[in-house]
Image (tube, grey):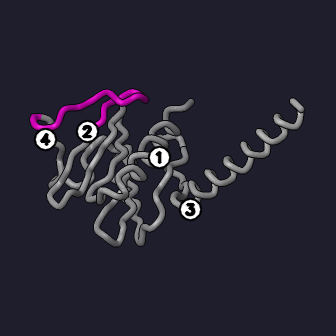
Amino acid sequence: MKAYKMMIRLILFIVITMFVSCSFSNQFRTQEFSAAGADKFRVLIPRGWNKTTVLPDGSGNTNQIYYYPDGAYLYISNSGKEINPNEMIDSAHHIALPHANGGVVYKGVMPGLLYWREIQKDNFRFGYRNVPTELENRFDSALNYSALMKYAK
């Protein structure tokens, strides 16, 4: 009887794992971030982007940006500078909180209930802007995963 119950639990575990992994893969896509002088690592990007750009700067650093049809965008950068100088984080109004992975995280709400967030550690920035409420958790998960992959060595 114990073997039967264990077999049922194992089958249930496998089915739930398959369901979760299929749901996860429908929402995200893994990409590779690589820049001169930096290790390559995997980043997680929410599906649905319609344009991506890779912008190297004069120092060999890279800004990788994913644009979405609704105006949202997600970025990964190793330049240590703001992606868009018009959207600098005002540290007098926004408190840097420690991130579980090290570094700091900023988060805020823009007009129209659109969210922004940025994780900063060393010269890396993982962030998003203009994200609607219903997608906020998905974008947060992508940033947390991407930052973890960078520093999981």
Residue 23 versus residue 51: which sits nearer the camera?
23
**CB within 8 Å, label 1 to label 2:** no
Q: Residue furthest front?
A: 1
Q: Residues within 10 Å of mark 3 (few under 14, many from 20)?
A: few
Depth check: 134 or 29 in front? 134
Above or below, 107 relative to 49: above
Mark 1, mark 3: which one is toward the viewer?
3
Kindly identify the amino acid type of the residue bearing the numbered disc 2: Tyr
Indicate the amino acid at tag 3.
Answer: Asn
- Looking at the rendered image, the disc whose residue lies closer to the viewer, 4 or 3, is 3
> 90 or 141: which is nearer to us?
141
Q: Residue at x 23, y 31 (%)?
A: 96
One can see residue 30 in this view? yes
Q: CA distance from mark 4 to mark 3?
A: 35 Å
Q: Which residue is the site of mark 3?
A: 26
Distance (Cα) linking label 1 and label 4: 29 Å
What is the distance, in whole Å, between disc 1 and disc 2 at their CAs? 27 Å
Which circle marks residue 36 in the picture?
Answer: 1
- Image x and y of residue 56, in percent: 37, 55
* Lower position in the chain sequence, tag 3 or tag 2: 3
